[in-house]
Image (tube, rainbow, N blue to C red):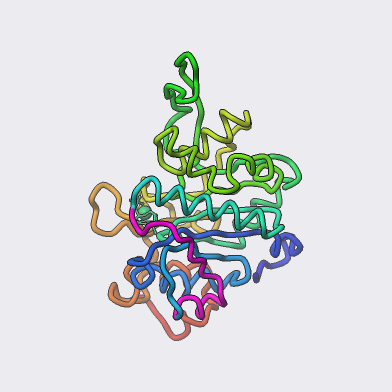
Amino acid sequence: VELGPTVPQRLAKDVYISVKTTRKYHAQRLGDILDTWFLLAPENVYFFTDSTDSAIDQATGGHLIQTNCASTHSRQALNCKMNAELEHFLDSGRSWMCHFDDDNYVNVPQLIRMLGNYDPRRDWYLGRPSTRGPIDIVDPQGEPAKKVKFWFATGGAGFCLSKSLVTKMAPYVRDGKFVALGDKIRLPDDVTLGYLIEHLLDKRLIVVDKLHSHLESMRLVRLDQLHEQISLSAGSYNDQKKNVVAVPQLFTDAEDPQHFRSLHCFLFPKSRICAGRSPL
Ligand code: UDP
Ligand code: MN
């Protein structure tokens, strides 16, 4: 990773970045990542998918992981991938796990700089919630029924977990146990993670407001604050056709459907793909 002098270099190789994807998005979304932010940290990024794809496997240097999870948007399929991400991270021996969706743009140097403020030998759950405060559910494991209150980081904004924390989560993760937990509480993977960390392990979410999911409008991210942001997203927002950061467009919509390349050139103008480009 090209981090510059302000970033702890030794941290760079300790960060494990997992990206959840699926067969139909290999063509639609992965190219945008592979041309842009993947190149900031090719040793750190792993893609978790549901089908083999030799072209992507080669382009990622063997970092495409076929999970055997279903290729659907079902809770089970998504929990299955999160389970795989957590288990692979545990096996990696690295200090930090950060999860993103395949419609996220990640400013990896900023991500690593942020992690430098925390000690991975302690328990950290860093993310951006999309509810104002903790949510209440009737505890499916409570006997007699009682309410539990917990907060969770939105998966689509990205979140990071320290090695110490994931090690404590392992009994609820190993051998497919995260899927079983998700089946029990019947909630999406990111909510299940909040239940596990905040309720079962009694650790608090730390809010990182520089992570952004497409539950927000990307147009509201100010350009003079763009360099500070850690993640951005390109998914749809309020049925708006394109939810993209308002950077000058250097590529046509056909070349750069999510405007990740234009964003990348705004942040890292010396990148190869930016050479000779000027605003359309
Ligand atoms: N995804 C998946 N299987 C599917 C559909 C989506 O693994 O059948 C992944 C997708 O690659 C992305 C995440 O789940 O990383 C969220 O999907 P998407 O952005 O399409 O929907 P959202 O939930 O954000 O509206
Ligand atoms: Mn999305």
Residue at x 38% of width, y 57% of height = 70
Residue at x 37% of width, y 75% of height = 250
Q: Is residue 1 left or right of residue 237?
A: right
Q: Is residue 274 visible?
A: yes
Q: Residue 196: x, y in percent?
A: 55, 35
The number of callouts visible is 0
- In the rendered image, the quadrant that contains the N terminus is bottom right
Q: Is residue 117 left or right of residue 88?
A: right
Task: For ligand 1, give the image quadrant.
Answer: bottom left
Residue 135 falls in image quadrant: top left
Q: Residue 132: x, y in percent?
A: 44, 30
Q: Residue 92: x, y in percent?
A: 67, 60
Q: Is residue 212 visible?
A: no
Which stretch did the figure color magenta?
Answer: 55-72
Residue 56 sits inside the magenta stretch: yes
Residue 62 sits inside the magenta stretch: yes
